[in-house]
Structure formats: C-alpha cells, structure tokens
Amino acid sequence: MTAHHRNPAPGRVSGAENAPTARAVRRVGPDYPLMRVHRTGPYQLTIADVAAHSGLPPELVRRLVALGLVDAERDARGRLWFRPSAPSAIARVRRLRDGLCLNYVAVGVVVDLLDRVERLETALRRSERAAKEPTTWT
C-alpha cells in the first residue's frame, strides 16, 4: 500500500478535496494538511507572539509567568497562551524593574499595590457619581 492509499491518522485530513481553505495551514507530509489552532476568547497570543511584541526572549517570558508577573493559561499540551494585554503588562514590569531598580519579587508587590489603588479609585469615582445623581422617591 502506498502513502496515498493509507488512511490518515485521526484528526488529519487527506486529499485535496478535503483540504481546508484557511490561509493558516501547515503541511505535514504531502497529503496531510493540518489547521493551525486559532484561539478565541481572552487568551489568544502564543509565547512567540508575546516575545516578539515585548522584545524579550521566550525563556524570560516563561520566567515572568512562573513568577506570577504575567497572566497566562496552559492548554492540554502545556503550551502557554496569553491575553492581548500581555505585552503591555510585560512593558509595565520592565519599566518598574528598570526605573526603580527592583527585583522581580518587589515588582510583583508594586504591581499588586498599583492594581489595588486603581480598583479603589474606580470604586470611589463610581460612588461619587452615584452620590451626585438625584434620587427619585416615586
């Protein structure tokens, strides 16, 4: 039996009649195109995307994830997926580390405090707006 007559492995598409038309197609052998996974939802970027956008090597991005400084999700294969805001979160960590000469643990504490201050300020603005709105008693 030749390669063209074998059944493809599960999850693979065989032959040109079943070939996907999406532009993000990788070929695995002559007759086995695979679709690239495009994630929807909050975690869409690969580690390569985040590394390219942030200007850091992937190893350092993994380290920032391990330290809890950048939010990521692991899929069933163990690959990291990031939110579109990950490069800006990394830029924030780098600014704090470089500008204040902090180690990564201290940067984590500062980031947590800044996030808490932002949430408190947002809640304060909401309550001030609510206090200014007239109440109807009907």
Image (cartoon, rainbow, N blue to C red):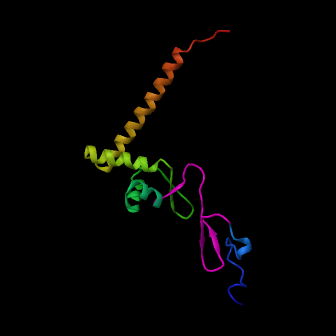
Residue at (39% x, 40% y) in the render: 112
| Snapshot quadrant of residue 17 | bottom right
Q: In which quarter of the image is the C terminus?
A: top right
Asked if residue 31 is among those painted magenta in the image, a careful observer would answer yes
Left or right? Give the position of 13 relative to 67: right
Residue 110, image x, y percentages: 34, 40
On screen, 75 above or below 118?
Answer: below
On screen, 73 above or below 17?
Answer: above
Residue 43, image x, y percentages: 54, 52
Q: Name the chief secondary structure element in magenta.
A: loop
Asked if residue 33 is among those painted magenta in the image, a careful observer would answer yes
Give 94 or 70, whichever is nearer the viewer: 94
Residue at (42% x, 33% y) in the render: 118
On screen, 99 above or below 30?
Answer: above
On screen, 91 above or below 9?
Answer: above
Residue at (69% x, 71% y) in the render: 19
Left or right? Give the position of 74 relative to 65: right
Residue 36, image x, y percentages: 60, 65
Residue 22, image x, y percentages: 65, 63
What stretch of residues is rendered in magenta?
Answer: 21-47
Give 33 or 106, whichever is nearer the viewer: 33
Residue at (47% x, 58% y) in the render: 49
